[in-house]
Amino acid sequence: MPLSRRLTTGLGIATATTLAAITSAPLTVAAAPAPAHVTAARDAASWLAGEFKDGTLPGPFTPEDWGLTIDGLVALSATGVDAPTRQAATAQVARHVRSYNSYDDWGIEGFTDGGATAKLLYAAAASGADPTDFGGYDLRAETLSLISTADAGHQRGRITSRTTADSGPDDSNTFDQSFAVLGLARSGDLPQDTVDFLIRQQCSAGGFRLYPDAAGGPSPSCDDQPGATLDVDSTAMAVQALLAAAEEGATDAGDAARKGADWLVTQQHADGSFGGSGPTTGANSNSTGLAGQALAAAGRDDEAARAAKALAALQLTAGNGGAASADAGAIAYNTDGLKAAAAAGITDTDRDQWRRATAQALLGLAQVPLGRIGLDTPPTSNPPPTGTASPTASATPTPSPTLTTSPPPTGTASPTPSVTSPPGTAAPTTTAPTTAATPAASGLGGLPTTGAAIGSYLLIALLLVGGGAMLLVLGRRRAE
């Protein structure tokens, strides 16, 4: 046998023997620890999952709040936590489409809320459900039917509500428009008119106004409204919607998103937090969560990290929770709420605020953009031991938009239309989550642990190189 053949055969045997030895022996490789903000996000999601009962979250006055339930879905999906709860919530929302986007439950027929319909479209698309058959409704077609085709110009492309009665000016806002852009981008072709209307809500400074209408009626653009109030929450939503639109090739969307992100940077407080507008002007976790998520989506990593740090400072842990230590993982709306809970626990009256704050705040910790939830595998805080690959994400992720649709009595972020359903289930009970120092319970999904994989490959490579070199030496000696 020629020397080259002998060397090849010998190297093959050595390789096979080496690989067999490697694969048969247990290999323990230390995986890199997850970033602190990822662990904090999963702890928050685990707490929130414990607040669900039969797939729903309650409101302050009703046992089922569909807007908040959708918000909970996006929070759990952004972290990959608790697939059974996500699946149950998706099924419940699908069964109650009209409870959320109409007044049918109160016997008032002929009304369809545009913002709620757009939010449902986003939830269906991001959860991996069929948006053309979600609970028997074609939400994409329904949303498209609610997009204004007016020839007036500045109202063209706006998401609107449909009613059989004259109810005055439409009350849709920039949140609603952002959900329309996100939902349509995630479910098929995105009409440019819808993107253009959202861009017209951006003032030259870069921020977006919450309401497209002035006192005297609709104003053509943000700059055309004297003294328009620029809103952090609305800007954060618009930035993420426009980034998703830019991925679909929408004209001018990328530039508007970058300009909005630049404005958000100027609104960040020294401690990394953000405030909203109107009653939410003070620093709060809702605004900080949305802004941090948008900054991460726009590649403003340093500012996003500062926002995450501010959010983590508002999170209950076993160490700082005091009387509320059983609710470790939950995120307070502000520092006053954190102090009150540590002193007296989370009261029944305050629990609704904690649910709303946590659902939105953890988005700034998870740092997965709204346009990517359900498409990208959530980061994991549970790297596997012994060099195995991380578990894959749930086959049925169930994300959703942020912000609730019932009026937040305790100071959450910018409002959206209030559509809740009649009482039907009992209020949920609280399950104590894991602390920040322990892996989140019931977590599924995660990125592969690259540290373990690379360690294995390096070891194999070293053994192969060593084996090959030894065979070459032996071959040369024989040839001599």
Image (tube, rainbow, N blue to C red):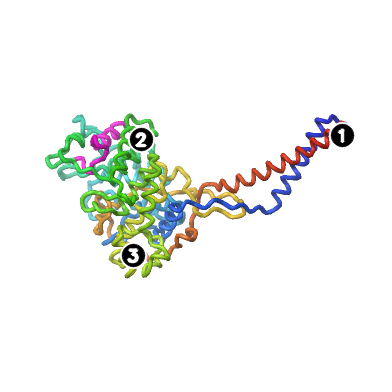
Numbered mark located on residue 396 in the image: none
Q: Nearer the viewer, residue 379 or 475?
A: 475
Residue 478 circle label? 1
Could you classify mark 2 by the number of other residues whose Cα lies within 10 Å: few (under 14), some (14-19), or many (20 or more)?
A: many
Mark 2 in CB contact with mark 1 (< 8 angstroms) = no
The kind of residue on which mark 3 rests is Ala
Q: CA distance from mark 3 to mark 1?
A: 82 Å
Whether residue 473 sits left or right of residue 189 in the image: it is right
Asked if residue 240 shows in the view, the reply is yes
Residue 175 visible in the displayed image: no
Viewer-nearest of labels 3 and 1? 1
Image coordinates of residue 71 in percent, x first then y, are 35, 52
Name the mark nearer the viewer: 3 or 2: 2
Mark 1 residue crowding within 10 angstroms, few (<14) / some (14–19) / many (20+): few
Q: Quadrant of residue 48?
A: bottom left
Q: Evaluate if marks 3 and 1 touch, with contact meaning CB atoms under 8 Å apart.
A: no
Choose between 47 and 143: the one closer to the eye.
47
